[in-house]
């Protein structure tokens, strides 16, 4: 059902709260064939790290604290009074906390909901392809 649907992406710059003074390039990505997740690709001169974050955690994190464990998203206001979301990611290898423009995140997520509305995600899962790749 999701064949031919072009993936969405958005390029952002995000201040790194866990390392003040540093700004990371962030690419948000979404594919209808993986409808529950948003990819956050963080890049710096040292390399790139991709985290898969539940779309609903990002959405709820725009208005209230959301997520547990390795991913937490919290709404806030920056020093200039602009709405932001703090995204905190932790793993055994380290942690990262960035501040991302909430309007940009909201606009991007609304585009994902236009592609795959809430409740219709299972219609877009590429389960046959996943099973084939696992059995290959």
Image (spheres, grey):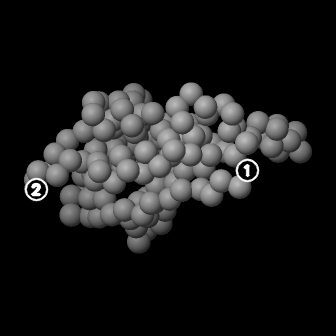
Residue 75, given in percent of the width and then of the height, sits at 25, 39
Look at the numbered disc 2 and give the secondary structure of its residue: loop
**Residue under pointer 2:** 80
Residue displayed at 34% across by 42% down: 88
Q: Residue at x 45, y 33 (%)?
A: 56
Q: Residues within 10 Å of mark 2 (few under 14, many from 20)?
A: few
Mark sitting on residue 3: 1
Q: Position of 115 compared to 84: left or right?
A: right
The answer to whether 104 appears left or right of 83 in the picture is right
Give the CA distance from mark 2 to mark 1: 42 Å
Residue 134 visible in image: no
Quadrant in which residue 132 is drawn: top right
Left or right of 44? Residue 102 is left
The mark that comes first in sequence, 2 or 1, is: 1
Q: Which is more toward the observer, 127 or 25? A: 127
Q: Position of residue 55 (x, y in %)?
A: 48, 38
Task: Give percent across and percent down for residue 136.
Answer: 89, 45
Q: Secondary structure at mark 1?
A: loop
Image depth: mark 2 or mark 1 in front:
1
| Residue under the point 29% across and 48% down | 102
Q: Is residue 127 visible?
A: yes
Kindly identify the residue that appears in the image at 47 percent across and 66 percent down. Answer: 47
């Amino acid at each position: 059902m999701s064949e031919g649907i072009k993936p969405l992406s958005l390029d952002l710059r995000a201040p790194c709260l866990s390392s003040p003074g540093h700004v990371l390039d962030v690419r948000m990505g979404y594919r209808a064939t993986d409808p529950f997740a948003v990819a956050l690709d963080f890049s710096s001169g040292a390399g790139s790290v991709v985290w898969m974050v539940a779309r609903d955690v990002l959405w709820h994190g725009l208005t209230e604290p959301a997520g547990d464990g390795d991913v937490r998203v919290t709404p806030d206001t920056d020093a200039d009074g602009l709405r932001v979301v703090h995204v905190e990611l932790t793993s055994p290898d380290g942690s990262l906390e960035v501040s991302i423009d909430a309007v940009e995140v909201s606009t991007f997520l609304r585009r994902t909901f236009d592609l795959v509305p809430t409740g219709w995600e299972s219609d877009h899962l590429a389960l046959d392809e996943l099973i084939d790749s696992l059995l290959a």
